[in-house]
Amino acid sequence: MMRLLAVSSIACLLALAGCGRSRVSVPVPDKEAADRLRATFAVAAGAAATAGVEQVSGTGWATLKGRFTFAGTPGQPKSLVVDKDTEVCSKGGMKLLDRSLLVDPSSKGLANVVVFARKTSRVKNPVGDSPLVFDQKNCEFLSPVFAARVGQPIDVRNSDPIGHNTNIAGTSFNQLIPANQGTAYKPDAETGMPTMVTCNIHPWMKAYAVFRKDGYVAVSAGDGSFTISDLPAGEPLEFQVWHERSSGPNGALGLDKPELKWTPKGRFQIRLEADEVKDLGTIEVPGSAIGT
Amino acid sequence: MNRFSPAGSRFLLGALVAALALVSAGCGRTPPASFRLNLVESTKQRLTREQEQQVSTVLLAMFGTPDDPHALPETGLDEAKLRLAAGPVRSDIVGRKNGLYREHCAHCHGITGDALGPTAAFLNPYPRDYRPGVFKFKSTERADKPTHADLTRILRNGIPGTSMPSFALLSAAQIDALVEYVKYLSIRGETELGLMRAFFELDDDAQGKLPESREFLVDEMLAPVAEKWKAAAAAQIAVPEMPAGLDLAASIAKGKELFYGDKANCVKCHGPTALGDGQANDYDDWNKAIVEIRKELNGTLENAAKASGGTAEEAADRRQQLAWVDRFQGVLEGDSLRPRTIPPRNLRTGVYRGGRRPVDLYYRIHAGINGAPMPAAKGTVSPEDIWHIVNYIRSLPYDFDGELGVDRPMVARDRF
């Protein structure tokens, strides 16, 4: 009897184990809501009443500036593993360092923070037609974070004596760039948050690119400062802030700044008056906002 | 005294047998097939359960279920073809085979087209995940979708060197239906990705819910994905004829020079022997996505281990991060495969995944391979030079007096 008991317990356990594939469960769709939705899809496009959102817009232009500082301890940047083309990439014992968290030791300025306007009603300047240069030298992209406007010509250059390829994730741009040459590229869509740029031949090479239609985007400089000029005045503006190592979703830099209504999604709101130069002053980024 | 009285243990035994019967019954029931949510993306985007449910409801409205597919006119898909491919394997009233996708494809590519079918983990390379809408072997520019003919060719010929077999024994109508169904799964998957990413772009007053208007869901989310598929036929790469009266030996020599030179730089990845032994520790886009997530999770764990103290708020933050990491690890366990590196092709075997016609090689070099590290040579390498490289590549399997001086084609084992 005891043996039977044991056997059937084991069988029970096995059966249970067989059923329990370790996949996280997914929510069940709401069938009725889906039927209702499908009925709305069937309505011919444009027939549905569209509540036109009144776009509030003023006149004139304004400037936004500020400076990011880092309050945590950045630590020593790691050396990158350079194991290809060492005659160029680690020429004379040169070491390439991880640039994901660049803090100016004297001013504590945090470089490579991206700030861009999410939506604007007006744009002052037309897209430029002189190419911006995105260069690589000594097996490193010279701009760790690169901002450009959609439609702006970019000269993707290679100033090394060896060949590279430049692969911009999410854009399907992945081109060979022969030694000491360049190739033209015109971004044709916005990136949303900055997207990764890599070289597949030299996998340690990494940068980020952000493309915006209106061009209202800035990357903080070595001392942490940034300026966005010619912003439309007299309308509520919302800015998105990003940093490569931010612990927020998609790199969003969430800060505790209630006066700017700063959200965990790394956004803040502001309204500028015509000809105003608004200085946000020093924006301190605590150590805890920087994750991986 | 015996702790188990005979009556007691009989009762226990009875209960266990009943439990066993119940559990087995639970296993045996077959629920109708359902599409599985892209949990890796939804967890990456930190969607709530309600947001995940909204996505699956919207997708149900747009695309129906695996047994009952639906195609909005905006998709440009033919629902009659989809019905032939969808559903369980069965014959209809005139004896025509239905449920082709589940018969031939789902065990690798999965019901959802997520490349998580039961056999997927055992294959190398892994089967294609259609959901990002990225396909490698096509006659269109890198950014464009494959044409209907491109996918048809893959189904007819299979992909040599992989587990993808030829389906040449199926009728033209059946292959046509399957190609249509692959497009359907891809459009569905790419729309799902777009919906999940759209939550992050929401304004705060949307309160974390996507607008359920036709304008947003169909015109903004679905239509742009479908448009790219419709535009594929017009995006074919214009291939100039191979220069007439070409001296093959000279062309091969020129191609070799380009292969090793700084301009085309093939040697960097395909290696000095062309055995695919150059830069070999990179990942394709599908695997890289998982690699990056794993890196992020490990980094978060490391940081959490280092961090201590701080305010109560910071501690709560950290706990939340750790809960997210924990959930994500569970999701990766069941909804992703162990990432694998992508070796550059060994060009000495004469096996070409995207087809062995000269024009196939031309497409690969001109546009690169979307989703793979292989970059595009167009723009920096002239069409004529691309033809020289094609000729050199095609000579490599027969290059018997290569570096090794052997009298047979060189293969990787000669080197490693």
Image: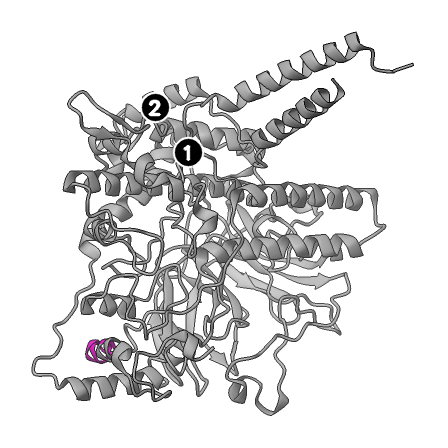
Q: Amino acid at mark 1?
A: Val
Residue B200: where, in percent of width, then height? 53, 43
User: Sequence-wise, which precedes: disc 2 or disc 1?
Assistant: 2
Q: Secondary structure at mark 2?
A: helix
Pick the residue in front: B341 or A29: B341
Quadrant in which residue A292 is drawn: bottom right
Q: How many marks?
A: 2
> Do marks 2 and 1 share a subunit?
yes
Residue where numbered disc 1 is placed: A53
Q: Residues within 10 Å of mark 1 (few under 14, many from 20)?
A: few
- Give the side of residue A91 with respect to residue B405, left or right: right
Q: Amino acid at mark 2?
A: Arg
Is residue A291 among the parts visible in the rendering?
no
Residue where numbered disc 2 is placed: A38
Is residue A38 among the parts visible in the rendering?
yes
- The reply to whether the magenta stretch includes residue B18 is no
Magenta stretch, main secondary structure class: helix
Q: Residues within 10 Å of mark 2 (few under 14, many from 20)?
A: many
Q: Which residues are magenta?
A: B382-390
Q: Specify the subunit that label 2 lies on.
A: A
Residue A38: where, in percent of width, then height? 34, 23
Q: Specify the subunit that label 1 lies on.
A: A
Residue, far bottom = A92
Residue, far right = B1
Locate the N terminus of chain B and report the quarter of the image it occupies.
top right
